[in-house]
Amino acid sequence: MTFSHHKNRIGIEFAGDYINIVVLQNIHGKEEVEYLESIMVKDLPDSAVIGLVQGAVKAAMARNYETVLVVSAKDAITKTIQIPSTVDHEIRDILNLQAGRQTPYAREELIVDYINLGQYQEVYTKVFVTMVPAALIKRQYQILEAAGLKTSKIIFAADCIGALCGEIVGKDTPDRTYALLNLGFDTADISIFCRNGLLFTRNIPVGVIQLSQDREKTVKRLAEEMQKTIEAYRVEEIAGVPAVLYVAGDEIIVPPIERTAFSGAGLEMHSFNIGDYVTIKEETKKTKGASSFSLIASLAACDKLHIRLIPEEVKLQQQFEAKARRIITAGILVMVIFFQLCLIFISKMYFKERYLGALKTGYEEKISEATRLMGLSEKNRVLKTYLGSRALAVEAIARLNEILPDEIYLKGITFENESKIVIKGTSKSMSRIFQFVTELENDPLFSQVKTEFTESRKEGTEDVSDFGIVMSLEGHEQAQPKAEENASTTGTEKKEADAR
């Protein structure tokens, strides 16, 4: 049979004078017991117990396994209580107040958890309460921690046994109740359960040791204790009275107990062998005893438990560690994403550089040719600009020659830049100078015509006036097109002349 267990687990139970250790592996979805041992620790100090546990774990070669601490019914106080509430958090608060009154311990000295058995008279809730001394749990937890085992779960054995047996024997009749006798070395647990799990449990000081010493007397006492358990369960009015009793163990334990031993309690007896549901390796069977049942069953069904007995400080520590793991995981995830983005960015840059290099190599000749053509184009532009400037100067001189009156002669013409021209000359009369300036202003080729100076002097027997005029060439932007047009006209005239 396969349970919902997917982890390799090592289970440890402090059972009086013994420590029981079981290693349960999940192999291809099936549970298999790889290691099983009971260690005698009677009257040993904790330091010696730690060494024995370390040796057993080393012998089992159980590394990176989930560690489960199983608390036996002998170490727990169990009660069935009616709580005047049906709300979970209110039930828990009431239990926290009542726990100290139900036991000789103060509330802070107890670890308390419960199983909800259902509503009673509509306003009450019947609960199965489990109380364990906190000092006992802390001691066992610290021993395992000192032995190098990080305990992840602390569970109640009877709770897991009820869940496992309820799933196995109660699957066909979910409303029926059953009784189970789990024989340990020196104690026994009597549990009553149904399909939903544990309903009632009781621990008695009778075990395999007593059975082997005086079988007849021990069987009789077991029958009496079973009768008392049934009566105590009947008083609680939890559910129906069981009619079937399962005795947990194997072929070594069950045969000595007669099938009719519990008929006085109205119970039909059957055996319950854990080996029928969980595979046990041949080399471990020789060490298997009656007390191994609760530990193996607890590991196989600890995912279905209701009761958790982890101390508050351990819970806080586990929560802190879980939060730290989440933060570390988030940090690692952020770093991974950052490195991936960097890798993508670097890869893009690398491939772009490679692509650009390939383009440069492929177009190197074309780039060289384009550079050469750009140089020629720039030279042509400069030459056209120069030729346009010269054409404009020639046109300006020709225009001055056309409008220059006979009474004025020029002494000099200066082109200071592409658009500014300065002329100096002499006129026989001052009025003729002003008339000449007016003619220049009216000419579209010239603009901003200004008389720079005028001076009167004698030239022989005549009075003359020297002058200077500054002006701008209005059409210097059209010089290049005009030059090309003049060149084209000249070429056309030359062709016509050749034709004639």
Image: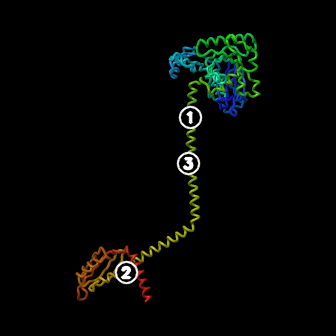
Which quadrant holds the N terminus?
A: top right
Residue 45 at least partly seen: yes
Query: Residue 75: horizontal and vertical position, in percent?
Result: 63, 18
The Cα–Cα distance between marks 1 and 2, rounded to whole angstroms, is 92 Å
Amino acid type at image mark 3: Leu
Q: Which residue corresponds to mark 1?
A: 324
Query: Residue 193: horizontal and vertical position, in percent?
Result: 63, 19
Q: Earlier in the sequence, mark 3 or mark 2?
A: 3
Amino acid type at image mark 1: Ala
Name the residue located 37 percent from the left edge and 79 percent from the top edge: 393
Query: Residue 500: horizontal and vertical position, in percent?
Result: 43, 89
| Label 3 SS | helix
Of marks 3 and 2, the one in the foreground:
3
Q: Residues within 10 Å of mark 2 (few under 14, many from 20)?
A: few
Q: How crowded is mark 3: few (under 14 residues within 10 Å), some or many (20 or more)?
A: few
Q: Which residue corresponds to mark 2?
A: 394
The Cα–Cα distance between marks 1 and 3, rounded to whole angstroms, is 25 Å
Q: Earlier in the sequence, mark 1 or mark 3?
A: 1
Amino acid type at image mark 2: Val
Name the residue located 53 percent from the left edge and 21 percent from the top edge: 92
| Label 2 SS | helix
Q: How crowded is mark 1: few (under 14 residues within 10 Å), some or many (20 or more)?
A: few
Q: Which residue corresponds to mark 3?
A: 341
Q: In which quarter of the image is residue 210?
A: top right
Name the residue located 58 percent from the left edge and 27 percent from the top edge: 314
